[in-house]
Image (spheres, rainbow, N blue to C red):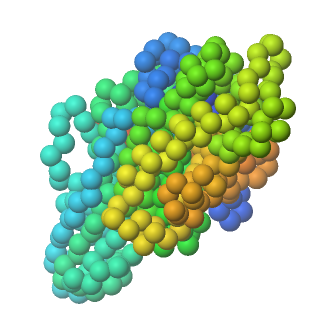
Amino acid sequence: MAKNEVISCIDVGTTKVCSIMARAGYGHDLQVLGVGIAPSRGLHKGLVVNIPEAKRSIQASVRRAEQASGLKMDSAYVGVTGRHVNSINKRGVVSINRGDKLVRSDDLRRVLRAARTVNVPADRKLLHVIPRGYALDGQEGVRDPVGMHGFRLDVETHIITAAVASVQNLVKCIRGVGIDIEDLVLEPLASGESVLRVDERDSGVVLADIGGGTTDVAVFKDGSIWHTAILPVAGYQITRDIAIGLGLPFDVAEEMKKKYGSVIPLYDSKEKDKSTLRIENGYSVPYQELSEIVRARFEEVLKLIALEIPGSESIRDVPSGLVLTGGSSNLAGVDILAEEVLGLPARVGVPTGVYGLADVLPDPAHATGVGLLLWGTKGNGSENTWQTGMLGGAFKRLMSRVKKLVR
């Protein structure tokens, strides 16, 4: 990305819509120009269930980002999540037929096309084809074969598919507010860009983005994506259990969770008697009972995450452990509980790589939004299969760039 070029993203979540506008600065960091956050309506577990309401939420978020930046948002990177997303790993093979047997960029495109020849049902479409690693004449572990000599080029890819109808509903909402789509990005891949370190990606790490409606899981090994999964449990279930268990309205339970939520209950009887929590509208609950409910539900989420770790010896497979991010990872003590339940090193991931008007962004809740911006600046070697498969997708992206140049 050229320096000073403006890049935008829209993270359409179950509880909030976050739009960010930034400018490419020095190095790999981005200068944040404007942030717009609006309550999310019309979505459930990452899926659009009411298009008019979803459009109003997106529009409110975009307008706030535009007002803060003083610029117009024409196009954006958009996150995708939901139970409808599936993934597989597939290998592709091509021969190098030139006389010099030199691997070139065209050969990388050919081998990726060979890998994506999978039987995809009519109601599904490819979202990402991401190279995990290359092999040249049987030599594994090649990360960039361009310029090397060989007769046979293999690639191991991570292929992600999504339900056509679900993504098209999201696309309709974004375009309905006058925003073109630069790319559709699976949300845990974006979150990984903003919270994971290079050494964690290389050695092996599990990323769990626990949001309001879904928990997005991604396993990284050898510097690339290894496995992805979307779990339909997250912060919503925690809030619902608080509401049912303590007899509170849902919005009051959500406020209690955000303000006092912890997975470390108090067991000292003296402290227990004193710890009654109150909020402004007159509701009060015992801290001990609130914490026990939050802990029990969060333990269940952690156990579901553990089922997504490949192999039987989890510590050997992911020595860097678990990185928790997303809004629900703001609950006090979640990293301690994760280490206790899973027996893995754990930390809470906060997004990095931005500066400027970014005081609100160093929060796990904004890992996906920041990650979408970083994804757009880096390219990541992923083939944008959804847009290229849509009629006029390439033309619309070209026109978006022409409009920027004209302004």
Residue 280 occupies quadrant: top right
| Above or below, comparing residue 69 to residue 361 in the picture | above
Q: Nearer the viewer, residue 379 or 328?
A: 328
Whether 213 is drawn above or below 378: the answer is above
Q: How many marks?
A: 0
**In the rendering, at what x and y percent does residue 150 appear?**
23, 85
Residue 246 seen anywhere in this rendered image of the structure: yes
Q: Which residue is drawn at 53% across and 59% down?
A: 322
Which residue is drawn at the image coordinates 23% and 60% (left, top)? 90
Task: Tell whether 232 sits left or right of 357.
Answer: left
> In the image, 6: left or right of 220?
right
Q: Where is residue 369 in the image (x, y as percent from the top left)?
A: 60, 42
Residue 40 can be seen, yes or no: no
Please give the name of the residue rendered at 45% of the width and 69% of the height, measured from the top-left corner. Answer: 315
Q: Which residue is depicted at the point 49% across and 71% down?
A: 319
> Does 72 appear above or below 345?
above
Question: Which quadrant of the rendered structure holds the C terminus?
Answer: top right
Q: Quadrant of residue 38?
A: top right
